[in-house]
């Protein structure tokens, strides 16, 4: 991660924490422009390195280990992420908890599906009289745009499969629900 020293935008909740209504300041986010977007894209392209980068050439078992480590650490941030879901986009507690838990379950399911896909690729398949060894691999740099209505679940439903397959990514979170990702960067 690159530390940001430039201009920032304040992030407010529409939920007031005062007697007289005033939006609640939750934090701030970097003001990024075209220059920073191009730098992020260049970094993702360099990391992919035409399929020869560290992440795309990493063994399946090692990428799975990285994802398992991430989701294990993610679970320790549940309370913080749930609170930010409530404050930032106005979800109630049960819905915020459900979104977090569903996302964790989705990541585990994706890991299991990827393991099965890898096992299946170890054997030959016969189709129309032709024996083939089908092996799936990364495609390149993936752009992931996070939606505001399910900023955790829908974002990770796009991002996790792309990453676990060995792709690199440029990720642009939704304008609403952006702070809830901060604890996950730790």
Image: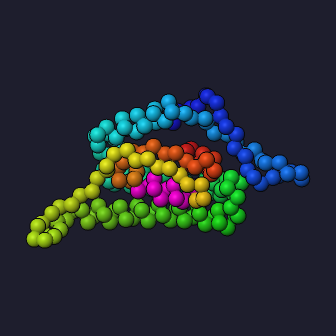
Residue at image location 40% in from the left, 53% down from the top: 162
Residue at image location 68% in from the left, 61% down from the top: 91
Residue at image location 56% in from the left, 32% down from the top: 3
Q: In the image, is residue 42 part of the stretch drawn in magenta?
A: no
Task: Give above or below for 30 relative to 14.
Answer: above
| Front one among 124 and 66 | 124
The majority secondary structure of the magenta stretch comes to helix
Residue 122 can be seen in this image: yes
Give the magenta-colored segment's residue range.
Answer: 151-161
Q: Is residue 81 left or right of residue 132?
A: right
- Name the residue furthest top: 5
Q: Which quadrant of the structure image shows residue 112? A: bottom left
Q: In the image, residue 56 lies at what x, y percent? A: 32, 46
- Name the residue furthest left: 129
Task: Give above or below for 46 relative to 149.
Answer: above
Q: Is residue 170 left or right of residue 151?
A: left
Q: In the image, residue 24 lies at what x, y percent? A: 78, 47
Q: In the image, residue 143 lies at what x, y percent? A: 44, 47
């Amino acid at each position: 991660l690159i530390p940001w020293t430039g201009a920032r935008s304040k992030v407010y909740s529409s939920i007031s924490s005062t007697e007289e209504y005033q939006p609640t300041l939750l934090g701030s986010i970097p003001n990024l422009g075209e220059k920073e977007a191009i730098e992020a894209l260049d970094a993702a392209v360099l990391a992919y390195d035409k399929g020869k980068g560290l992440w795309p050439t990493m063994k399946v078992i090692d990428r799975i280990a990285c994802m398992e480590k991430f989701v294990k650490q993610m679970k320790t941030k549940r309370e913080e992420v749930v609170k930010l879901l409530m404050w930032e986009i106005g979800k109630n507690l049960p819905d915020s908890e459900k979104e977090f838990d569903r996302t964790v379950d989705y990541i585990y399911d994706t890991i299991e599906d990827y393991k099965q896909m890898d096992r299946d690729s170890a054997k030959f398949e016969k189709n129309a009289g032709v024996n083939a060894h089908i092996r799936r691999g990364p495609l390149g740099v993936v752009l992931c745009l996070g939606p505001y209505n399910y900023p955790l679940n829908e974002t990770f439903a796009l991002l996790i499969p792309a990453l676990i397959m060995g792709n690199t990514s440029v990720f642009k979170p939704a304008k609403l629900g952006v702070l809830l990702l901060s604890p996950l960067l730790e």
